Amino acid sequence: MADADTDRTKALLREQASARRAALGEDFRQEASRRAAAHFAKDVTLEPGAIVAAYWPMRDEMDCRPLLLWLAERGQPICLPAVVTREKPLAMRLWVHDAPLYPNGFGTLAPADDAALVEPDVVLLPLLAFDRTGTRLGYGAGYYDRTMAALSKPVRRIGYAFAAQEMPVLPRELHDVPLQAVVTEEGIRHFMDNGEAA
């Protein structure tokens, strides 16, 4: 359980991070999304058949769709998360490019309920903010932390964000799963599992 001071700090940081991201112009966001996809394609090595969990963007998140197109073109399996209930991990559903997607709450889309459930090898995590040690600030519902804890195997955890979403220091609690890398429009940065910059 988070203490009250940490909860208040995170709530304030979420407000600041949301405002910072919302201030980015639409043209900038579109170009940044294309550049981030190009950096991922150049700098992230994927094994053949490795399943990549991405996300369908909501509001003003970094747009994964240019990256989804690249992954699909090279035949990389893709899954997208679906909310099952408020307390459960996300269901990672296999998705074939151009297959229909359906509203899944929060303004995002997910594959159909009968899509195959899979465990990814790489997870792209949306976020509100990150810091130089790989701490991720999400939206506060804990979906991704629960999902990472429920997987039966280690996965590569890569944040996908705008460079402007970096903050100097973020609080990290025991249940907060750190990033191993973050991809932005400026390139990729790696973090060590001990919370230091690589």
Image (cartoon, rainbow, N blue to C red):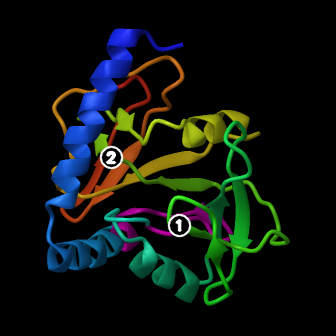
- Using the image, determine if residue 35 lies above or below residue 134: below
- Along the line of sight, the residue nearer the viewer: 148 or 28: 28
Q: For the point 54% across and 65% down, which residue is it?
A: 46
The magenta segment: 40-57
Q: Is residue 18 magenta?
A: no
Q: Which image quarter: residue 78?
A: bottom right
The residue located at (37%, 65%) in the rendering is 59
Horizontal relation, residue 51 to residue 9: left or right: right
Asked where in the image residue 150 lies, by quadrant, the reply is top right
Q: Nearer the viewer, residue 134 or 110?
A: 110
Q: Is residue 168 left or right of residue 156?
A: left
Amino acid type of the residue tagged 1 in the rendering: Thr
* Image quarter hosting the C terminus: top left
Q: Is residue 171 visible?
A: no
Q: Which residue is mark 2?
A: 128
* Residue 56 sits inside the magenta stretch: yes
Q: Between disc 2 and disc 1, whose residue precedes?
A: 1
The percent position of residue 3, horizontal first and vertical second, equals 43, 9
Look at the picture and state if 89 lies above or below 192.
Answer: below
- Give the main secondary structure, helix, strand or loop, of the magenta stretch: loop
Give how far across and how far down residue 133 sits, in percent. Answer: 29, 31
Q: Dot 1, how many residues are within 10 Å of its Cα: few (below 14), some (14-19), or many (20+)? A: some
Q: Quadrant of the N terminus?
A: top right
Element under disc 1: loop
Give me the residue at 67% from left, 54% from top. 83
* Circle 2: residue type: Leu
SS under mark 2: loop
Q: Nearer the viewer, residue 190 or 146?
A: 146
Q: Which residue is mark 1?
A: 108
In the image, residue 166 sits, relative to residue 9, either above or below, namely: below
